[in-house]
Image (cartoon, rainbow, N blue to C red):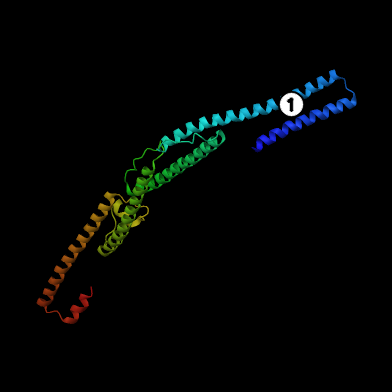
Amino acid sequence: ALSEVLAAEAVTCLNRAMAALRDIWEEIGIPEEQRLERTDTVRKHIKSLLDMMVAEEESLKERLLKSIVLCRKELDTLCRELQLGPFETEEESTILQMEKNLRTCVEVLQKQKRDRKQELKALQEQDRALCDILCTPLFNIDTNSVPSLEDLDRYRRHVASLNTLKEQRQEEFASNKRQIILLMEELDHTPDTSFERDVVCEDEKVFCLSTDNIMALQKLLQQLEAQRALNEAVCTELRARIVALWERLQIPEEERESSAMH
């Protein structure tokens, strides 16, 4: 392996350096006793450097092992929160690769958790806005835990159904409102209740589209239609009486036509 070759080269470099030092000491004329001291100093320096390097690598190993333990705990928690099966690791992988894989998985599951919580928050905001307009209860979901994919799917379909209901009721309100305004104008009827004033003045985006309000709206329309039908019946009867009186009084056709305009 390349690492073994480099290690052998390091030993060769050390031996070459020691030989060079001995040659220098010999040329200088340093006594053997001092050579031994200097050699021991070199040994101590090299040993200290190597011990420090070994300690750093041991510390790295310990940090990786601690990270693996923490990542496993975090993964167990995330799997429970996200309602996933237990996470399985490749036991034959190296410490470094295992730590990297576990850390990557933690990041992926943390993102899934954030995404689900964010979607839940967005759905709740839409739900509250729709419930305010439709006067319906909020969707029943535990907001303290991470929602499952099934919970989010049910919530999406619920919000979509509320949106559809809101659109239907807005269309019904707008249609009934137009008819009510026309009938009030025809009947010369001034809105005299708070509900009637809300119907005439409020926009469908503001008007409370509750079931009770929609029923009250339909009832008001039916009452106005009934009033118009009654007025038409009375008018028909009065017209018939006028025609009968014209006949009895022998009113000329020209006079009848001028009166009929009204």
206 shown above or below 71: below
Q: Picture coordinates of residue 252 (x, y %)?
A: 15, 81
Quick one: 231 or 163, which is closer to the camera?
163
161 shown above or below 59: below
Quick one: 111 or 242, which is closer to the camera?
111
Quick one: 192 or 256, which is closer to the camera?
192
Q: Which residue sits furthest left?
A: 248
Q: Which residue is mark 1?
A: 46
> Is residue 47 left or right of 258 when viewed as pictured?
right
Quick one: 88 or 16, which is closer to the camera?
16
Q: At 47% from the left edge and 35% from the top edge, which residue is drawn?
A: 75
Q: At 76% from the left edge and 33% from the top edge, which residue is drawn?
A: 13
Q: Picture coordinates of residue 150 (x, y %)?
A: 36, 43
**For the C terminus, which image quadrant?**
bottom left
SS at mark 1 in the image: helix
Q: At 77% from the left edge and 29% from the top edge, which residue is drawn?
A: 15
**For the N terminus, which image quadrant?**
top right
- In the rendered image, which quarter is residue 6 located in? top right
Q: Picture coordinates of residue 158 (x, y %)?
A: 34, 48
> Is residue 9 left or right of 161 when viewed as pictured?
right
- In the rendered image, which quarter is residue 258 located in? bottom left
66 shown above or below 226: above
Q: Picture coordinates of residue 143 (x, y %)?
A: 39, 38
58 shown above or below 217: above
Instruction: Look at label 1 and name its amino acid.
Output: Ile
